[in-house]
């Protein structure tokens, strides 16, 4: 295992291990610290971030091994590791202090913490954009895998960009400012309802209003979901002859990537309308229905054409 990881980006692997360790510490906090913050156990947020960062940093460390721009890739990976590591440290610091990390302007120190985190996220987004640009020019032996990485990075960038809506003042906060008042909290991940209300287990996504974290989460982890589909199609090649064609596998990956992007956009649109993810209205259901129909039709067309070509090739071999 150590030999296989020898060529991987070391700072990102260190961050992966550190994030796993933080996750274990957070589990201890969940078990022995009964403090609650914005309606959830105080250690739940760093636990979720540590798990997400561990998965994300490990994925980026692997992706960078596929790039031929070694020096540029190393620096980009280092930037990603520093930004994500810094964010996790600040989140844990605020938990230890017993206060929130995001949108917190209660004191100059809290405001500095959140401003630093915002800067880290913007820098992280730019670094991921640069990695995506490098992937556009990177040729891999398997086109379906190459396109899964490109589309996964694109969707991840969109998912990260959803977070840029969160620091904007809510209507209630803007009203307070207009009346000459102030607010310790500026911004929110919920739309139409205060943060910290009723939410789904573990993830905490609002069940009574919009929640931008849904699209944010889905988008970020496209970087794992779409490449995993490409690997699954490769593994299924021996069982399904139609998948032996790179064109078929690539087409399926592109359809899946665009469908995933559509799901992220619909989730963000739903949240911005103040609608809970578990209570979609007719417009949301209609959009999802159109997306599902388009994916089904595209998938069927790709498999049908691929099956015909495969059958034709088999006949030519026999002849």
Image: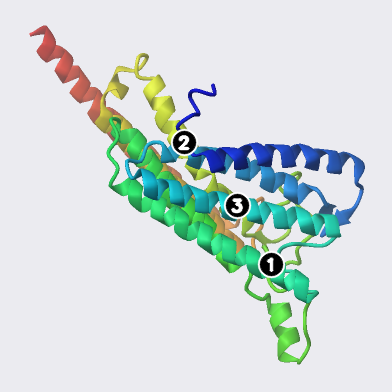
Side (left or right) of 18 relative to 63: right
Residue 82 spot, x, y in % from top left: 58, 53
- The residue closer to the viewer here, 151 or 63, is 63
Q: Which residue is mark 3?
A: 84
Q: Residues within 10 Å of mark 2 (few under 14, many from 20)?
A: some
SS of the residue at dot 2? helix
C-beta proximity under 8 Å, tags 2 and 3: no
Q: Which residue is rendered at x = 66% and y = 76% of the image?
A: 169
Sequence-wise, the earlier of marks 1 and 3 is 3
Q: Quadrant of the C terminus?
A: top left
Side (left or right) of 294 relative to 45: left
Q: Which residue is mark 1?
A: 114
- Residue sticking out furthest to the top: 318
Q: Which residue is rendered at x = 35% and y = 41% of the image?
A: 67
Q: Which residue is rendered at x = 80% and y = 75% of the image?
A: 107
What's the colour scheme? rainbow
The alpha-carbon separation of the residues under discs 2 and 3 comes to 16 Å
Q: Which residue is mark 2?
A: 62
Sequence-wise, the earlier of marks 2 and 1 is 2
State whether residue 264 appears in this view: no
C-beta proximity under 8 Å, tags 2 and 1: no
Sequence-wise, the earlier of marks 2 and 3 is 2
SS of the residue at dot 3? helix
Residue 113 spot, x, y in % from top left: 71, 66
Residue 5 spot, x, y in % from top left: 50, 28
| Numbered marks: total | 3
The alpha-carbon separation of the residues under discs 2 and 1 comes to 30 Å
- The residue closer to the viewer here, 92 or 275, is 92
- Residue sticking out furthest to the left: 319
* The disc label shown at residue 103, or none: none
């Amino acid at each position: 295992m150590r030999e296989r990881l020898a060529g991987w980006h070391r700072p990102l692997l260190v961050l992966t291990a550190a994030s796993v360790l933080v996750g274990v510490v957070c589990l201890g906090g969940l078990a022995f610290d009964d403090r609650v913050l914005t309606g959830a156990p105080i250690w739940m947020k760093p636990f979720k971030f540590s798990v997400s960062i561990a998965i994300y940093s490990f994925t980026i460390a692997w992706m960078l091994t596929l790039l031929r721009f070694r020096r540029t890739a190393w620096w980009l990976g280092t930037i990603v590791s520093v930004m994500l590591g810094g964010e996790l440290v600040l989140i844990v610091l605020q938990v230890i202090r017993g206060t929130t990390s995001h949108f917190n302007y209660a004191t100059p120190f809290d405001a500095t913490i959140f401003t630093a985190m915002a800067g880290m996220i913007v820098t992280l987004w730019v670094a991921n954009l640069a990695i995506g640009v490098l992937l556009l020019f990177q040729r891999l032996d398997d086109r379906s895998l190459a396109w899964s990485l490109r589309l996964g990075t694109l969707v991840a960038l969109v998912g990260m960009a959803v977070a840029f809506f969160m620091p904007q003042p809510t209507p209630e906060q803007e009203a307070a400012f207009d009346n000459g008042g102030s607010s310790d909290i500026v911004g929110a991940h919920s739309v139409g309802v205060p943060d910290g209300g009723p939410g789904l287990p573990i993830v905490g996504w609002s069940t009574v209003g919009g929640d931008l974290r849904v699209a944010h989460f889905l988008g970020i982890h496209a970087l794992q979901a779409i490449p995993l589909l490409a690997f699954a199609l490769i593994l299924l090649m021996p069982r399904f002859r139609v998948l032996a064609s790179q064109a078929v596998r690539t087409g399926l990956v592109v359809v899946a990537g665009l469908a995933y992007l559509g799901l992220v956009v619909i989730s963000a649109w739903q949240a911005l309308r103040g609608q809970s993810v578990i209570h979609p209205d007719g417009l949301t259901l209609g959009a999802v229905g159109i997306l599902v129909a388009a994916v089904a039709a595209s998938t069927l067309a790709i498999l049908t054409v691929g099956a015909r070509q495969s059958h034709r090739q088999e006949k030519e071999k026999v002849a």
